[in-house]
Image (spheres, rainbow, N blue to C red):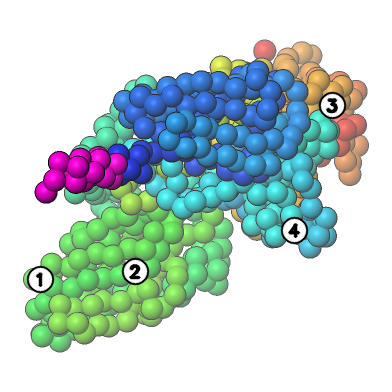
Amino acid sequence: MSALLKSITATLAFSSCAALVASAAASPAFAPVFTDHAVLQRDGEVVIWGTADPGEEVTVSLGEARSMRKNVKTNADGEWEATLKLKGAGGPYKLTAKSKNGEQSLTDIMVGDVYLCSGQSNMEFQTRYATNAYSVMNAAGNDSLRLFTVPRRISLSPAKGFEEEPGWMVATASSVADFSAVCYFFGQQMQTAADVPVGLIASSWGGTIIEAWISDESLGEMPSLADKVELQRLARENQDEAKAQYKKSLLEWWYKTDPAMTASPAWYAADLKDSDWKPIATDNFWEFAGIRQLAQFDGLAWYRNHVVLTAEEAAQEATMTLGPIDDVDMTFVNGESIGATDGWDSPRTYTIPAGTLTEGDNVIAIGVLDTGGGGGLWGPAESKTLTFADGTSKSLADNWIVKISAPIRGLGAAPTSPVGGPNAYTVLYNGMIAPLAPYTLNGVLWYQGESNVNNASEYADLMKQWIADWRDTFRADDLPFFFVQLADFGPVAKNEPTESAWAELRQAQNEVAASDEWVGMAVTHDIGDRYDIHPTQKRVVAERLALIAKKMLLGQDLQASGPMPVSATLADGKVVVDFTEGPLATYGFNKAIGFEVCAENNCQYTDATVSVDGVVLDVPTDVTPDKIRFCWADSPVCNLYNDADLPTAPFEMDIQ
């Protein structure tokens, strides 16, 4: 080969290598939460982040103004972060990240107010199912209202992105239909009131506990949760060991808590006589099984089924599928514990080791803990099967029987599975909140608590911890939070006062709202549905949340709260209760109903005479009360409002 040819060949080879290196270089990319049609928060510093090559310089710009341009450099992991100072609302703009290796541009970016909406099923509840949905969706077109739905995701560690690729959408009839109804109606109210673009981020999962939405670091600061947090951390390293420890702790809890476990014989035993148990269908929750005692039951109940096997079938290992069980199950076969799962919508699949089954009658016994809402075995018939190692199978859809063991009140919180379901500690924070952070927000909306009613005593501390955690996550020490107090659901208190886990959780929510000037609570006990945990009147819920936000964030002079009790004083044989946020008004009667006077936890209803700013309660002559209660029931019936048509929150208060 001639020298010239060698030179040409070397030059071409070098050029080819250079081209390969250049093609391998990564163009800047925005984090997945940034897409076309996004809304950025006005009037402050906004964090924008993404990826590029390590050590690369990236120029981030919004529109054409030099003041909206920032040069940043990626770290060793190829991550960059830019902070832009935005003033006022406006748009549409182009958002660009550019380096020597390329660029990414997003279009139709607006600047206005951004809200994150989160919680469980009542926040997830879609607009298409809300009251007057047809007319609402037909009138939904609004270019100044943008929607972003976070896909469901469980993650043992904080995620940087989403398993699916969501995107910001302009509000239209089709995009609004499947979006959170409360979030949409709230955004509609705030967009009109502020007259700026509004961005709404919906990140919710039905049936979930608040612990799933709090970071590992924050939960670990609570001494009462130390063991559970350590189990969750173990799951990152060794899921099998974490599952084994969970099953052991759940079995210990069940033995300690459920009288059926210590009965003689125990309800899981193969030799238990169960002829007096009630037949039950397993295609729907037990509330819809036609059994009166289960129609509004939350707590512990047991299912049993007898399966007759041949000697050949019994000799094999088998796999049992049971479909989903709401909420937690402890499953036995012939008296042997074979599995436990936490998660109302998680299908159960358990291995039955060889030697467990016997020729003839075999007993499947399932202890079920329902913490609220639907309960028990549910799902299609084909989801319930017993499959043997040789591939043959038997249906388990029929012949189930059931018996109630203990109601939810007083049981205490059961251990939570660290793997597999959305109620594992921190997994929804990791999968559905961490990828959003630190997106700059104007406020957070929260509708949750139904799944924590069996642990109301700890809920106030959990909620305060959650608020502090998200403020840290989104880098805003005074980030406002607006939440919904639990609506009515379940039994009313009939002729006498009753204890109520729902009322206790509402009282915990009262405490949280009173503890922080940047937290507001919407009261909804009068617009729920005691027969349906998912009431459809979501517009009114959102309007009450928006009243608080308009007053707090926009400075509007309006009444945003119902009457608020400030003191209860015993004087001259009467209890005088002073209120703010009046003037007080009663509906349907000239006295307030739902008040109780209590002495050493013995409570009784009393007459309540209403004035403009207070209520006077009669006290029986033989009683020296130490506290009062109002609207104290799962589904309270009470009539104390103010002139703004806003109800008084259920409450409990010591008497001075």
Residue at figure coordinates x 60%, y 22% from the top left:
69
Horizontal and vertical percent position of residue 356: 13, 69
**How many neighbours does mark 1 have within 10 angstroms: few (below 14), some (14-19), or many (20 or more)?**
some
Start and end of the magenta stretch?
1-17
Q: Disc 3 or 2, which lies upstream in sequence?
A: 2
Q: Which mark is residue 322?
A: 2
Is residue 392 left or right of 88 when viewed as pictured? left
Task: Residue under label 4, please give it.
Answer: 173
Q: Which amino acid is tagged 1?
A: Ala
Task: Report which quarter residue 60 is drawn in.
Answer: top right
Horizontal and vertical percent position of residue 40: 65, 31
How far, Cα to Cα, is label 4 from label 1?
56 Å
Question: Can you see residue 616?
Answer: no
Horizontal and vertical percent position of residue 158: 38, 36
Task: Residue under label 1, please give it.
Answer: 354
Task: Residue under label 3, please give it.
Answer: 559
Q: Which amino acid is tagged 2?
A: Leu
Is residue 637 left or right of 62 when viewed as pictured? right
